[in-house]
Amino acid sequence: MCGICGLARTNNGAPFSPHLLSRMRRCLSHRGPDDEGVFLDDKVGLGVCRLSVIDIEGGHQPQANEDRSVWIVQNGEVYNFPALREELKTLGHSFSTQSDTETIVHGYEEWGEDCVQKLRGMYAFALRDKRREKLILVRDRLGIKPLYYTLLEDRTLVFASELKALLLHPKVKRSLDFAALDFFLTLEYIPAPYSIFKNIFKLPPGCLLVYDNGDIEIKTYWSLESLPLEEKPVLTLSDIEQKLRTLLEESVRLRLRSDVPLGAFLSGGLDSSTIVALMKKLGCSPLRTFSVGFEEKSYTELKYARRISQEFQTDHHEFMLKPEILDLTQTLIHHLDEPFGDFSIFPTYLISWMARQQVKVILTGDGGDELFGGYDHYQAQSLARWPLVSFFGKASVPLVRKIPPTARKKGFWNKLRRFIQGFEHDPKLRHLRWMMFLTEQEKRALYSPELLHELGGLEALSQKEPFQSVFPHLSSLDETNAELFLDLKTYLPDDILVKVDRMSMAASLEARVPFLDHQLVEFVFSLPGPLKIKGLTTKWCLKKTMAGILPAKTVNRSKEGFSIPMKTWLRTELKDLMLGYLSEARISREGLFQYASVKKMVEAHLQGRENCSHPLWSLLVFETWRDSYL
C-alpha cells in the first residue's frame, strides 16, 4: 500500500518545485513508511511513499519500462499480476522486478488504456506516457483506493491519495463547497465526485482521467450498469452455492499473496467469519485475528468473535475501546481531511493500530452487507412492500409525526418511527430515507438563511448528482437489487471504504476486501434480489453457501451492527468539547447555522429526551475540521 501524489503542467505552466513534490510525498508517509521515490521531467512530477508488501527489496517506485518512456506510481495491489506477468512475457516483455506495479507498466505498453480491463485488485495509480505526452490517473472499479485531483487556473493538474497533500500546493484554494457540506450533514459523508472544497474532486470509482496539455477527459472503464447483457443459463440453487463458494475462495486466495505477515479483522458476524473460515481452509498459518470491544456490554460482540476464533483455532487478539477519545478525535479528523460522520472510525482505527503491531496486511469482511443485503433497512424495504403493512404504514404517518424519538439507540419505537416515516416518500425513494440523518424540515430549521441562499434552496437527493445519474438505472433492476446497486454506487465507496482506507492507512496497515473482487460482484448482481433478501431473511444465499462451513449460530445470528456508544460519550467525555465547538458565540459568528436549532438539539440530548448523537457529532466534526483546514 502506498500514498501517491503529483503534478502535470502545460507547455506554458510554471516549472515544478522539487521541494513541493517532496513535501506532498512526505505528507503521506503514514500510507507508506518503508520507502519513497520521485520522478520528475519537464511536464510531470510523480511522488510516492511505499508500504512494502510485494517484492519488498525490488519493488521500489516510481517504476519504468525498459526505455523509460512510461513511468508509474501506484497505491494498492493488483492481485492477478503473476498471470498477467506470464502473459506479457509470452508477448515479448521483460521484467526487472517481481512487483505487481511493473505489470501495469508493461500492460500499458501492450494494451494502452485498455490494460485496466485486465487488472483485478484495488488500486489508484498515475502513469506518465512520455511518447504521447499524457498523464493518466486510474481508480479501481469499486473505489477501494482514493484519488483526489484539481485543475488550477493555469491548467496545472495536482493530484494525491489524500486531500492534505494536495492542499500543500500554494495555488490550491481552500474554499468551502456548500453543496458538499449539505451532503455531509444529510448523509454523514461526501459522495464522489465532490470534496469539501470547491474545484477539488474525487475521481469516481471505475474511472480514468487523461491529462493532455491542460485538458482533462474522464472515462468510465467499468460499471455494473454497462456490463453486456448476455443470455445466462438458469442456475439451480446448488449451482449458485457452488459458484459463490468458488468465487469467494478464489478471491480470498488471491488476497493471501503477500511477502509480509497478514491477518483478519473478526467481529464474529457472517462476513468476517466467512473470510476467516476461508483463510483457514486455504492454509493461512499462523492465522491471526483481531477484534475490538466496548465497556458498554450492549455494544460488544467479543463473545461472537471468540466463538469463531475457537472454531478455526486462530491466534486471537482483543482490544477494549474506552471513551478516552478527546485527543483521538483530533487525530482522526486530521487523517480524514474532510468532514466524515461515521462513528465507527474509532474502533476501525484502534483495531488497525492493534493489528499493525503484528501484521502489515489485514483481510476484512467489508462489502458483504452491500453485496448480499445485510442491513436492517433492506428488511424494512421488503416489509414495506407487503400490501397490509403499506396500508397501515401510510395511515400511521400523521400520528408518528407527533411522536418525538426516544433517547435509546436501538429502541423498538425509534425503529418503528423511522420505518413509518418512510411512507411519506415515493416508494422508489424510501431507501434514501434510511440513509439520511437530517430531513428537509430539520435542515430548514438548522441552516441559516445565508447557507440556504448559497445552496439555492434544498433539493431532494434523487435530483442531485451523483444520485441523479444512478436512479435511471434502478428501473431495470428488481427492487432488492436496485437498493443494493444504489448503495454500491454511493454509500459503499464514499462511506464504508473511505473509513476502512483512511483508518487502516493511518496505522500503516493494508486492508484487503475479498467481498469486493469485481468478478464476485458481477456474479452476485446477476442473481435475483429474492435470493439475497428472502422474506425478512438477509443474506439468504450467502447463509446457504456458508451453512456447514460456519457454525449454525453464526450463520443464523441477526446482524448487530458495528456501532459505538457516541450518544453516551457526548453526554460525558465529549460534552465539554461539544459545548465549546457548538457555542452560541461560535455558531453565530460563522453564520452557517441557526443557534436556536443547535441549542435545542444539545439540550434534548444532554437531558436524555432524545438521541441527537448523529447531527450533533456531525456538527462537532465539521467545526473541528473547520478549525484545522479553514
Image (cartoon, rainbow, N blue to C red):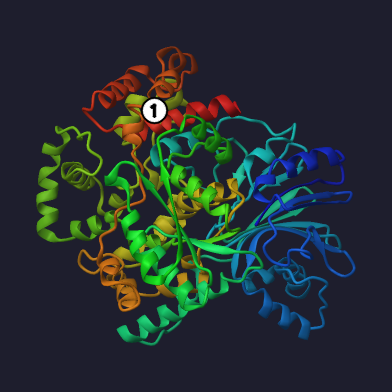
**In the rendering, at what x and y percent does residue 317 appear?**
46, 56
Indicate the amino acid at tag 1.
Glu
* Residue 280 left/right relative to 307: right
Numbered circles on residues, count: 1
The structure residue drawn at horizontal position 32% and vertical position 22%, both measured from the top left corner, is 597
- State which quarter of the image contains the N terminus: bottom right
Residue 244 in the image: state x and y as whole percent: 41, 78
Residue 105 vertical position relative to residue 568 in the rendered view, above or below: below
Q: Is residue 347 above or below residue 553?
A: above
Give residue 202's position: percent from left, percent from top: 59, 48
| 539 shown above or below 33 | below
| Viewport quadrant of the C terminus | top right
Where in the figure is residue 14, as x and y percent of width and height? 85, 38
Q: Residue at x 20, y 41 (%)?
A: 414
Instruction: Please tell me in which quadrant of the rendered image residue 165 appears.
Output: top right
Q: Let me know if residue 543 appears in the view.
A: yes
Q: Quadrant of residue 261?
A: bottom right
| Helix, strand or loop at mark 1 | loop
Seen from the viewer's position, the closer of residues 428 and 486 is: 486
Mark 1 neighbour class, 10 Å CA radius: few under 14, some 14 to 19, many 20 or more: some
Residue drawn at point x = 24 percent, y = 59 percent = 379
Residue 483 visible here: no
- Toward the top, the furthest residue is 585
> Quick check: 395 left or right of 542?
left
Judging depth in this view, the residue of 370 and 282 nearest the camera is 282
Q: Which residue is mark 1?
A: 573
